[in-house]
Image (spheres, rainbow, N blue to C red):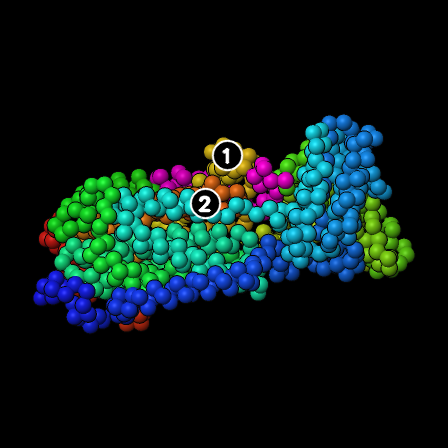
């Protein structure tokens, strides 16, 4: 009856009985009021875009704010006792063909630095030829640098003021007179080119969707849904950046996540809708069915990503809040668009969704039809025939890829990992060449002196002990404040800021050198500077690592327990996801820390991994793994609840989801991998890690390891104590009866392997 009514009135409300599922009702409402839904989304997008443009973004890259570390205390002490030296500094680095001390070159350097002195927000310019500037000229005499001190720190310095300094200084460059600028302020304004990675990811998604659907209209729906949600996210982030610490890479991270999951979620819904049409449903009924099944799984999977990302708020670092919040907003908007805008778009498309064919009719469409035994059906049978062999081989692959993970080193990277075309990278390389790598990350030792007299001895003693350290290249003479109750020493390490020996040096200075030099003198000492601040922030993240990991794993297990009414499947899922995440981490280490893919992908230098990246990846990947797990296991459970045997349910579930999961994974992989081609190293690392993790999770884990484990566990997969069944609410109820035609498959409960 339902099918005949659908055929008679494909677009009318009477084609579908009152849906029991809330998402089915929402999908029905969106379908019937599609013009209103589209108009509201358009209005919201315009308003958010206008608000974001009017507010103008104020992204902040202060990765050390919000913590009470020793380096932060040192920064506060310097602001109080040395206000004239509290601002950030930039280095103007000169590389000359003739010696810098020659008359012509000397006058050219003095003239260039003099032109910077009167610029806005510049409070001082220190020449290499002024008092105390002897150490600003390299031993070979061909590299020198001046110091530009600004009147603020971090994001308090306007980008325009920094850019004016860069432009004015580089205007003096000439053949044989190279001028480059480095330092934290310069890095702040060197933003990566926005849009290139996103465009490449969308282009790849278009190609894959065309291959999967064979229809231009079906391809456009997931793309448009994701783009609308991501564009709305940008406007929200622009406004929020005035109240929160949103890092400059926050919008790109949100785009990376939003495009990946947005296209992914819409793909599942559109696939289910097309399946409903092929089974004889009308467009309205197919929308309700798609929302009641795939839509519910989308909401569950997206909610899991959001909840996993909330674990990052346990770190207590504002810049992590901003980065996580951007990803959370993108996922939330993608979910809302998937259950409102997408049903409305399906209403506009109706049965015309398969028009505008590209190439021959996809074989995948035949495989989805009831009674088909396509590739994934046969694949599932092969895995089930040899579950120990298949499972063992999959685990061996994951463990082998995870081996480099044991060498993971966490540390904030510096300008030495920037693209070679950035002026901050060229200044970094010149300073390292002329003065040693440690010149790019000086340490600041601040001393609070208890009296005005008799303190030169402890300060001199400390300076001598610092200079005697094997990893210290130079210690500046002490500078005293006007009151004589504070002093500052600048320590130039012999190693780069991201070198493990620099971290060890900071620890040794704080715990051994300083206490030994000032014991019994009443002098209080703080070790700070940008390098020390980065080391301290890495320590804060490391101390919270176990807490965040435990939160995400427990949350994932509990949500899967509630979703699948099973104890075994959630535990197995968490363990297998840990394996795939470990393998992704191993690939990251091999590429960015060991340099296995050459100089192109790592900007020509190997370096440790920024400490926040593994945690961000862990939260995201555990959430993403839910996508495929929910779509695969919920389909298997539908088969099992409909009467299929344990083995048959697994094979049928794999047969009906394998093509969609691999297509969705291919889109995610391309979107994430496109960010590997961008300029910013942190997004390159995240993009590669996520692309590899999704590849492994959707193929090795979901298509090989999970079916093998489910086959070995048999009926134990669905064991669920009655007490837990009554205590834990169900998030994914059984599919409505209307889906019976869509979920019908050839294997019966009596069939074996």
Which residue: 36% across, 62% down?
337
Location of residue 422 by image quarter: top right
Whether the magenta-drawn stretch holds residue 405 is answered as yes
Reading the image, the residue beneath label 2 is 197
Image quarter where the N terminus lies is bottom left
x%, y% of residue 280?
A: 13, 58
Which residue: 12% across, 62% down?
7
Q: Is residue 482 left or right of residue 634?
A: right
Q: Nearer the viewer, residue 726 or 335?
A: 335
x%, y% of residue 362?
A: 21, 44
Can you say whether 609 is above or below 350 in the image? above
x%, y% of residue 442?
A: 71, 45
Q: Is residue 108 left or right of residue 409?
A: right
At mark 2, the secondary structure is: helix
Reading the image, the residue beneath label 1 is 600
Q: Is residue 457 left or right of residue 674?
A: right
Magenta residues (range): 396-423
x%, y% of residue 543?
A: 55, 56
Which residue: 78% across, 37% down?
109
């Amino acid at each position: 009856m339902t099918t005949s009514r659908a055929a008679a009135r494909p677009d009318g409300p009477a084609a579908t009985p009152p849906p029991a599922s809330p998402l089915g009702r929402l999908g029905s409402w969106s379908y019937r009021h599609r013009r209103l839904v589209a108009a509201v989304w358009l209005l919201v997008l315009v308003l958010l875009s206008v608000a974001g443009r009017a507010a103008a973004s104020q992204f902040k890259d202060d990765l050390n704010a919000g913590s009470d570390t020793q380096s932060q205390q040192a920064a506060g002490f310097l602001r109080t006792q040395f206000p004239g030296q509290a601002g950030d500094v930039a280095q103007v680095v000169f590389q000359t063909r003739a010696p810098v001390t020659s008359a012509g070159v000397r006058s050219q350097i003095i003239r260039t630095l003099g032109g910077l002195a009167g610029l806005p927000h510049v409070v001082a310019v220190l020449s290499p030829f002024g008092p105390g500037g002897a150490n600003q000229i390299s031993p070979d005499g061909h590299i020198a640098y001046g110091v530009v001190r600004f009147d603020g720190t971090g994001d308090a310095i306007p980008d325009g003021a920094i850019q004016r300094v860069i432009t004015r200084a580089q205007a003096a460059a000439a053949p044989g007179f190279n001028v480059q600028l480095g330092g934290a302020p310069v890095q702040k304004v060197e933003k990566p080119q926005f849009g290139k990675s996103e465009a490449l990811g969308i282009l790849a998604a278009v190609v894959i969707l065309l291959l999967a659907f064979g229809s231009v209209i079906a391809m456009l729906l997931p793309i448009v849904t994701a783009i609308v949600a991501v564009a709305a996210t940008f406007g929200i982030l622009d406004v929020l950046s005035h109240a929160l610490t949103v890092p400059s890479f926050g919008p790109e991270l949100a785009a990376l996540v939003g495009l990946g999951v947005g296209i992914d979620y819409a793909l599942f819904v559109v696939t289910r809708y097309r399946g409903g049409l092929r089974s004889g449903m009308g467009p309205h009924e197919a929308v309700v069915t798609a929302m009641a099944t795939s839509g519910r799984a989308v909401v569950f999977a997206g909610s899991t990503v959001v909840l996993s990302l909330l674990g990052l708020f346990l770190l207590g670092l504002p810049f992590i809040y901003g980065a996580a919040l951007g990803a959370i907003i993108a996922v939330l908007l993608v979910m809302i668009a998937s259950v409102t805008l997408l049903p409305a778009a399906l209403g506009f498309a109706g049965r015309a969704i398969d028009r505008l064919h590209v190439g021959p009719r996809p074989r995948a469409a035949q495989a989805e039809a009831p009674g088909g035994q396509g590739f994934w059906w046969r694949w599932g049978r092969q895995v089930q025939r040899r579950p120990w062999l298949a499972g063992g081989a999959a685990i061996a692959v994951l463990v082998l890829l995870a081996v480099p993970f044991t060498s993971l080193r966490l540390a904030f990277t510096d300008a030495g990992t920037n693209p070679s075309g950035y002026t901050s990278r060229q200044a970094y390389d010149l300073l390292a060449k002329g003065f040693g790598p440690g010149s790019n990350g000086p340490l600041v030792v601040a001393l609070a002196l208890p009296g005005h007299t008799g303190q030169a001895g402890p300060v001199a003693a400390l300076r001598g002990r610092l200079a005697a350290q094997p990893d210290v290249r130079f210690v500046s003479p002490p500078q005293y404040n006007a009151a004589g109750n504070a002093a500052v020493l600048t320590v130039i390490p012999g190693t780069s800021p991201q070198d493990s020996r620099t971290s060890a040096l900071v620890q040794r200075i704080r715990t051994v050198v300083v206490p030994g030099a000032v014991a019994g003198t009443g002098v209080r000492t703080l070790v700070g500077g940008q390098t020390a601040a980065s080391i301290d922030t890495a320590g804060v993240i490391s101390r919270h690592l176990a807490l965040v990991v435990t939160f995400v794993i427990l949350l994932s297990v509990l949500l899967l327990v509630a979703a699948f009414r099973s104890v075994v499947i959630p535990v197995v899922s968490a363990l297998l996801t840990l394996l795939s995440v470990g393998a992704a981490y191993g690939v990251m280490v091999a590429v960015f820390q060991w340099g296995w893919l050459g100089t192109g992908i790592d900007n020509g230098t190997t370096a440790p991994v920024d400490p926040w990246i593994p945690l961000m990846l862990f939260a995201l990947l555990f959430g993403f793994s839910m996508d495929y797990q929910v779509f695969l296991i919920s389909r298997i459970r539908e088969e099992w609840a409909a009467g299929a045997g344990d083995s048959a349910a697994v094979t049928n579930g794999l047969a009906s989801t394998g093509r969609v999961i691999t297509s969705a994974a291919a889109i995610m992989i391309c979107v994430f991998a496109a960010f590997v081609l961008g300029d910013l190293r942190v997004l390159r690392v995240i993009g590669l890690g996520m692309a590899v993790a999704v590849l492994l999770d959707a193929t090795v884990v979901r298509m090989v390891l999970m079916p093998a484990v489910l086959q070995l566990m048999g009926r134990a997969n669905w064991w669920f104590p009655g007490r837990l069944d009554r205590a834990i609410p169900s998030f994914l109820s059984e599919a409505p009866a209307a889906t019976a035609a869509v979920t019908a498959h050839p294997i019966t409960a009596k069939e074996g392997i």
